[in-house]
Amino acid sequence: MKALIEIKSENIVNVANTLIGILADEFILYVQTRKAFWNVESLHFFYLHELCEDQYTMIGRVVDDVAERIGAMGHYAPTTLREYLQLTHLIERSNQTKDDTVFLRDLLNSHESIITNLGKHIDDVDQKLHDAGTRDFITGIMMTHEKMAWILRSHLDD
């Protein structure tokens, strides 16, 4: 069934593809945050464990929201790790450390990379694809990442 949304039909594919790239980034960040949750060791373990749990829960909601918006446009969300790794702009790290500072920096770098990327998508979706709904949707996601990045940044010395 055709989606009845306020986007010109010729733009829907481009908007859906933008969202698919965002979904891949979100899923990879979700996995990175789970990795920190499972592996971090520190004098502040309990707090950092809870912090990571809070963040992967928030990211999990974003993943669901993005996948559902893709579906609302009449497209299918990718669901394999292989697809996500091909579509993401994030770098997958396989460091074998349990150092809390390394985990926090890696997560912060990923959030900041996503924030920058989302900002570019906001401009494209708004100015080129004329989709105010998706522009606002992506802006909300960016604000979520800005808050999570701020929290991570508050735990780092520099």
Image (cartoon, helix red, strand yellow):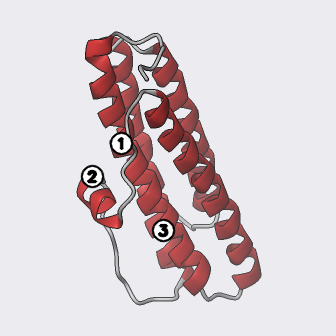
Q: In which quarter of the image is the N terminus?
A: top left
- Are the residues tagged 2 and 3 within 8 Å (C-beta)? no
| Residue 74 shows up from this direction | yes
Name the amino acid type tagged 1.
Ile
- For residue 12, what is the image quadrant? top left
Residue linked to disc 1 = 20
Asked whether the residues under the numbered discs 2 and 1 touch, taking CB atoms below 8 Å apart as contact, a structural biologist would say: yes
Residue pointed to by mark 2: 87
In depth, the one of 46 and 7 nearer the eye is 7
Q: Residue at x 49, y 29 (%)?
A: 72
Q: Which mark is residue 31?
A: 3
Q: Residue at x 39, y 37 (%)?
A: 19
* Residue depicted at 62% across the width and 49% down the height: 61
Which badge, 3 or 1, comes first in the chain's sequence?
1
What is the distance, in whole Å, between disc 2 and disc 1 at their CAs?
8 Å
Indicate the secondary structure of the residue bearing disc 1. helix
Count how many numbered circles sit on residues in the image.
Answer: 3
Above or below for 5 versus 92: above
In the visual, does 120 lie left or right of 53?
left
Distance in Å between CA atoms under marks 3 and 1: 17 Å
> Which tag, 2 or 1, sits closer to the chain's start?
1
Residue 51 x, y percent position in the rendering: 69, 67
